Amino acid sequence: MAKAKRQKEAPPPAQIQSLLRQLGKGEWPSAIVLRGEERYFVDQAITGIIAAAAKRELEVVRYDTADPDFQASDLCSDLIGGALFASARLFVIRGADALLKKNAGAAAASFAPAVLARAQSGDGGGIVLYGAGLRANQSLIKSLQELGAPTIACRKLWDSPPPWDPDPRKAELVQWLVQRARERRISLSPDQAAFVVAATGNDLPALDGQLDRLAQGGGDVRSEVTWQGAVSPFQLAEPILAGDAARAIAGLESLFQGGFQGRDGARTLDRGALLALLFSALGSKLREVVAAGEVLARRGAAADALEAAGVKGTPTAKKTFEARLRLRPHEEWSRMYEELCALEKRSRTGADVDAVDFARLILRWRRRAPARR
């Protein structure tokens, strides 16, 4: 029997809009799962859910596992108890993933059964579980989905374009910003949105703030938008290796001016740490293409080349790697790797290596468009 093709997951804004439409029609699920690390979407979803709960006159009960006073036993008792001031309750539980870990403790062991009991009660209330570490394959989440619980992926938007279409305007984050500006009735073209994203980074509240400036000012993007983007060295490696000198130089400037913001929100500004991250990002990708290129140079199979490079994961990840591999001949990739290794060796022997040295690499590695005939 042929395996059913997996349906492509809708972007987070579309998933949230679909959920809120469902709630607006009075279709109230017994549980809702919000998973992923993008707090902007989580807060947007929870705000909409609570507004819908108010129309149903539900009592809203909030718990946060990060609260110093949080007790798992209190939550479990509350879940299996009755409503005090309303006919039913909506539980909003932040950090629910912490209660599903194996080392969460004895009190947390009662959490999943209590959630299921509440979801199966049919009292007209509901539960909202949020956690960056919640997964669709966890047993509790699977059980809730069998009860009809929607699972919303509140992930970060892709801030780089797909490898098969490197136009920065095609990046998911840029397209979201264009749509967000349209919702707020602010004129913003895809070109302007790409500039705002480059200046701001993958920070949705900050991008909303840039739209505030555009709405209050004269709408001149170059003069109203403040440059505050924090670039990831691993994202910056892509245009550098692709030979897109313009994007790479702009990203390099952003990295050393704005630093690198990790998933925990902390921002790295130390030059030495930024250099080490950039060496690591470029070095790992160059080692992959050099290893694959050596296999192909010996007329090896494409599958063996991928194995030699250590490329695993989704078909999309493999296509991305194959597209990068085709950008340059093997000899050129090898030369680039040697140049990077030489620069890294210089940095470790006390030489003063900085962004200017990487700018020189970017200019040497740039790919020129073919001459028009």
Image (cartoon, rainbow, N blue to C red):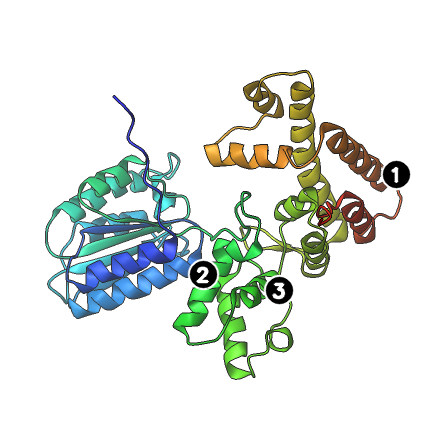
**x and y percent of residue 7 in the render?**
32, 40
- The quarter in which the N terminus is drawn is top left
Q: Quadrant of residue 292?
A: top right
Work out whether residue 139 can be spotted: yes
Amino acid identity at mark 2 = Trp
Q: Is the residue marked by circle 2 packed among few (<14), some (14-19), or many (20+) residues within 10 Å? A: some
User: Which of pointers 2 and 3 indicates the residue nearer the eye?
Assistant: 2
Can you name the residue that lies furthest to the front here? 373
Q: Residues within 10 Å of mark 3 (few under 14, many from 20)?
A: many
For label 1, count other residues whose C-alpha is less than 10 Å away and answer few (under 14), some (14-19) or many (20+).
few
Residue that carries the numbered disc 1 in the rendered image: 349
**Towards the viewer: 22 or 82:** 22
Front-most of 218 and 191? 191
Q: Of helix, strand and loop, which one carries label 2?
A: helix
Residue in the foreground of this view, choosing between 278 and 261 = 278
**Residue 363: image x %, image y %?**
79, 49
Q: Position of residue 16 (x, y in %)?
A: 32, 57
Residue 124 in the image: x percent, y percent?
12, 57
Q: Which is more N-terminal, label 3 or label 1? A: 3
Tag 2 residue: 176
Residue pictured at 69% horizontal, 20% vertical: 297
